Image (cartoon, rainbow, N blue to C red):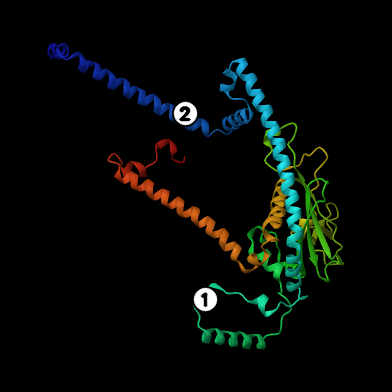
Amino acid sequence: MADIDNKDQAEMDPADMEDVEEVEEEETGEDENSKARQLTVQMMQNPQILAALQERLDGLNGSPSGYMESLPKVVKRRVNALKNLQVKCAHIEAKFYEEVHELERKYAALYQPLFDKRSDIVKAAYEPTDEECEWKADEEEELTDEMKEKAKLEEEKKDEEKEDPKGIPEFWLTVFKNVDLLSDMLQEHDEPILKHLQDIKVKFSDPGQPMSFTLEFHFEPNDFFTNTVLTKTYKMRSEPDDTDPFSFDGPEIMCCTGCPIEWTKGKNVTLKTIKKKQKHKGRGTVRTVTKTVPNDSFFNFFTPPEVPENGELDEDSEAVLAADFEIGHFIRERIVPRAVLYFTGEAIEDDDDDYDEEGEEADDEEGEEEADEENDPDYDPKKEAAPPAECKQQ
């Protein structure tokens, strides 16, 4: 039998022998790849290795690419010339934003009479005329005159049954509650105070002064504090940083300052009193200690974290300031100019529509991908459903 096997082996086509050897090599390679994958999975589960990799990646951030290092010296010299041109572009861009700020100031003066009239209507200082109140809503377009008259009579009957309200009650509180970014700041104890908020105004810095804007919150006399106006000022940087000119992307808020609130005694909602029991170690006696601690409130908005001279902040303070800057910018850009639309919810619906469109596009793309997979003759849904062994959770 051994001779027959040797004879058969001798008579085999050399090509067949090569095929056998190739298969064996491929199988050996698969074993090595499997071991390598398993080793990689084990390494990626090691927190020390992950930390070392992250540190290495952080060190590479902002470092020049290998391509730049490989360029001839004469080409690098010309690239440096392009960078100098880019710095000049950044300074021209800064001038552009300065002129935009001047335009904002100019048009703010044109808007202000309209915003003042809005405020007068809200706080019942002015009653709009019938002509000013005429508004053709979408759902009324198809109504007949008879139906309109009937609806008008029903509204008048309801108004007679209710107490005649002054102005538009809780206008700004409703705006705040309708906007997620602002409602997240509100606490239940803030609402009775914000019912007295009559107006929010934006004031821009004077010509020739460093770029800034101030939010003014105007309150009617109330039992909570004696201030009639609470302010929040945001200072902005409008020119490139000499140490990093390429990071300039328009004016950015650098810091903000609030104002002291003159609280009525016992009405300060930014503080709360807690009682703690303490037991004496030696005598075993128990005493009750009263402490005053910070309390969550919208009115903490007027006491933002102070930025030290060296500009270094802890992570919590940085997060608070980042959120503060976003809120201040949103109030200036969206809330004040379009307050009535946030009161009615129409501006919120517009924002939701934008997100829905993106979602629909994403769904369409997923549908196209699924269709492509179904049309693929090599597509196997069973293989798609089962994740590779190295991807399974341990």
Residue in the foreground of this view, choosing between 279 and 119: 119
Instruction: Give percent across and percent down for residue 117.
Output: 75, 69
Residue 193 position (above or below residue 209): below
Q: Quadrant of residue 239?
A: top right
Residue 95 position (above or below residue 347): above
Instruction: Give percent across and percent down for residue 133.
Output: 66, 76
Point out the tag, 2 or 1, that comes first from the N-terminus: 2
Q: Quadrant of residue 53?
A: top right
Residue designated by label 1: 141
Instruction: Give percent across and percent down for residue 384.
Output: 36, 42
Kindly identify the residue that appears in the image at 46 percent across and 41 percent down.
393
Under mark 1, the amino acid is Glu
Query: Could one spot residue 297 in this view of the protein?
Result: no
How packed is label 2: few (under 14 Cα within 10 Å), some, or many (20 or more)?
few
Mark nearer the viewer, 2 or 1: 1
* Badge 2 element: helix
Q: Quadrant of the N terminus?
A: top left
Residue designated by label 2: 39
Q: Quadrant of residue 193?
A: bottom right
